Image: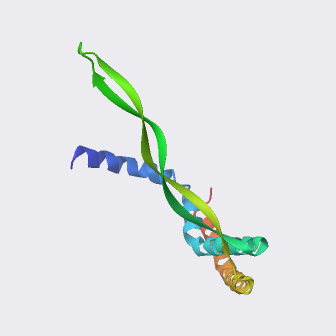
């Protein structure tokens, strides 16, 4: 086995241990859908409160900056110089998206119903994980 592969395999348990306790990993794994529905619900409720949704897009621009260059002088000494240059820059820009309030309310109602259906299994999973991995 190559040395780098062996070292990577040695560090794997350390990396996994950094992701939380076994109980936390169990709870996270078994309540993923419930948490996703909660996140979507909070986003929809925020959209309804604001009256619009947020969108994001990447905008590419050129940015003027200083670029470094190197030269060798006539006496063989190296030097550094700076010159203005353009570099590509990507910025994330947020923009407003109009929403249909009736559609957002239907979405909210469906998410509330889905969350209610997922609440009991999620609670049971949390209790099972706490029983399986007491801290």
Of residue 93 and residue 130, the one placed in the foreground of this image is 93
Q: Is residue 32 above or below residue 63?
A: below
Q: Please give the name of the residue rendered at 59% of the width and 75% of the height, measured from the top-left corner.
A: 33
Residue 99 image-quadrant placement: bottom right
Q: Is residue 106 above or below residue 92?
A: below
Q: Please give the name of the residue rendered at 76% of the width and 70% of the height, measured from the top-left corner.
A: 50
Position in image of residue 117 (x %, y %): 68, 84
Q: Is residue 122 above or below residue 109?
A: above
**Left or right, residue 89 beside residue 51:** left
Q: Please give the name of the residue rendered at 71% of the width and 85% of the height, measured from the top-left corner.
A: 113
Q: Quadrant of the C terminus?
A: bottom right
Position in image of residue 21 (x %, y %): 56, 55
Q: Please give the name of the residue rendered at 64% of the width and 79% of the height, measured from the top-left corner.
A: 121
**Left or right, residue 39 beside residue 60:** right
**Left or right, residue 60 beside residue 44:** left
For this orientation, the residue located farthest to the right is 49
**Left or right, residue 37 beside residue 88:** right
Here the colouring is: rainbow
Position in image of residue 9 (x %, y %): 33, 51
Position in image of residue 63 (x %, y %): 49, 46
């Amino acid at each position: 086995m190559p040395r780098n592969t062996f070292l990577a395999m040695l560090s794997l348990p350390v990396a996994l241990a950094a992701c939380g306790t076994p109980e936390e990993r169990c709870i996270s794994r078994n309540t993923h859908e419930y948490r996703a529905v909660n996140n979507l619900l909070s986003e929809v409720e925020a959209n309804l409160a604001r009256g619009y949704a947020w969108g994001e897009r990447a905008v590419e621009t050129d940015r003027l900056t200083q670029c470094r260059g190197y030269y060798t002088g006539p006496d063989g000494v190296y030097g550094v110089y700076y010159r203005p240059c353009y570099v590509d820059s990507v910025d994330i820009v947020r923009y407003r998206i109009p929403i249909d309030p009736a559609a957002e309310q239907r979405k909210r109602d469906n998410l509330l119903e889905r969350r209610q259906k997922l609440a009991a299994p999620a609670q049971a999973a949390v209790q099972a994980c706490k029983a399986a991995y007491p801290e």
